[in-house]
Amino acid sequence: MVGAIVMLALRVWVAAPMTVVSDSMEPTVMQGSIVLVHSAAPSLDGPTVGQMVVFRSPEDGKRTLKRVAGAAGQTVAIRDGALYVDGALIVEQYVDSRQIDGTFFHRVTVPAGHLFVLGDNRAISIDSRDYGFIPIADVAGTVLWPW
């Protein structure tokens, strides 16, 4: 009985599995994969650049998985498929650059209390380039482990 209560408490307050229903994070996280989501409230600064986060999509309200590309106060731009944060090129081993060659997105500055998120599969991902910045308060958790 105690073991069941501990497992339930861990799932509710610490981490919970989530099935990925989109291919927007491929090849890092394949559609149908399960990720373990740390559900503790984010700090006021929020998740850091490069972390994968789960939030409710502004488009349809469904739980969505994306990667943080920019945090509050940072500038973000995409030039010829390459991500630049505060003017510095970000090396992204998890993105297939052959699929996003020629992709551009104008420079934006992330407002306080928000994040700029992108899917790893940039060619098809619907993300902050489409629906704008994500309030840190809307982040349900960070991904601890994709498998």
Image (cartoon, rainbow, N blue to C red):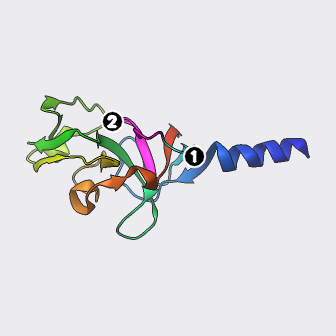
Q: Nearer the viewer, residue 72 or 22?
A: 72
Q: Could you tell me what secondary structure mostly forms the magenta stretch?
A: loop
- Residue located beneath label 1 in the image: 39
Q: Is residue 77 magenta?
A: no
Of mark 2 and mark 1, the one earlier in the sequence is 1
Residue 87 location (% of width, % of height): 12, 32
Please, which residue is most extreme toward the bottom here?
A: 60
Residue 134 location (% of width, % of height): 34, 54
Q: State the residue at coordinates (22%, 38%).
A: 74
Q: Amino acid at mark 2?
A: Val
On screen, residue 82 versus residue 114, left or right, reads left
Residue 53 location (% of width, % of height): 43, 46
User: Pointer 2: residues within 10 angstroms few (<14), some, or many (20+)?
Assistant: some
The segment highlighted magenta reads 43-54
Residue 143 location (% of width, % of height): 49, 41
Q: Nearer the viewer, residue 110 or 25?
A: 110
Secondary structure of the residue carrying tag 1 is: loop
- Residue located beneath label 2 in the image: 49
